Amino acid sequence: MREQVRDLLHEIQVKSWQLEFSNQMFNYEEIQMPQLGPTELIIILIIVILLFGVGRIGKIAGELGSAIKNFRESLQGEEKKKEEEKKE
């Protein structure tokens, strides 16, 4: 029994050492998302326009706008139903 405990403690020490060593090798705090400036956004917009075309982008934007509108209306409809149930 003592040998098993000793082996288990040894294994825990080895694993903690390995974890500490790997954290020292790779500093997680230094990783940051790249920031997109106006130049990068313009380049991305140009690439999107070249890929999809102006007409298709307009269609996609219209569909997205109508989807958001329908979503908001459905949320308001649910709120109105809840208010009516409370009044009754």
Image (spheres, grey):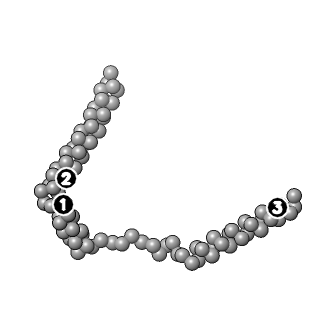
**Earlier along the polypeptide chain: callout 1 or callout 2?**
1
Question: What residue would you read off at disc 3?
Answer: 5
The residue at the point 33 percent across, 30 percent down is: 82
Question: What residue would you read off at disc 2?
Answer: 60
Q: Residues within 10 Å of mark 3 (few under 14, many from 20)?
A: few
Q: Disc 1 and disc 3: Cα gap in Å?
A: 64 Å
Q: Residue 52 carries which label?
A: 1
* Callout 3: SS: helix
The residue at the point 27 percent across, 37 percent down is: 74
Q: Is any atom of residue 38 visible in this view? A: no
* Disc 1 + disc 3, Cβ < 8 Å: no
Q: How crowded is mark 1: few (under 14 residues within 10 Å), some or many (20 or more)?
A: few
**Earlier along the polypeptide chain: callout 3 or callout 2?**
3
**How many discs mark residues in the rendered view?**
3
The residue at the point 68 percent across, 73 percent down is: 17
Identified by mark 1, the residue type is Phe
Q: Nearer the viewer, residue 4 or 41?
A: 4
List x then y, in percent, for residue 78.
30, 34
Give the residue at the far right of this rendering.
2
Give the residue at the far front of this rendering.
51
- Horizontally, residue 79 falls left or right of residue 24, namely left
The residue at the point 74 percent across, 66 percent down is: 11
**Earlier along the polypeptide chain: callout 1 or callout 3?**
3
Give the residue at the far top of this rendering.
88
* Disc 1 + disc 2, Cβ < 8 Å: yes
Q: How crowded is mark 2: few (under 14 residues within 10 Å), some or many (20 or more)?
A: few
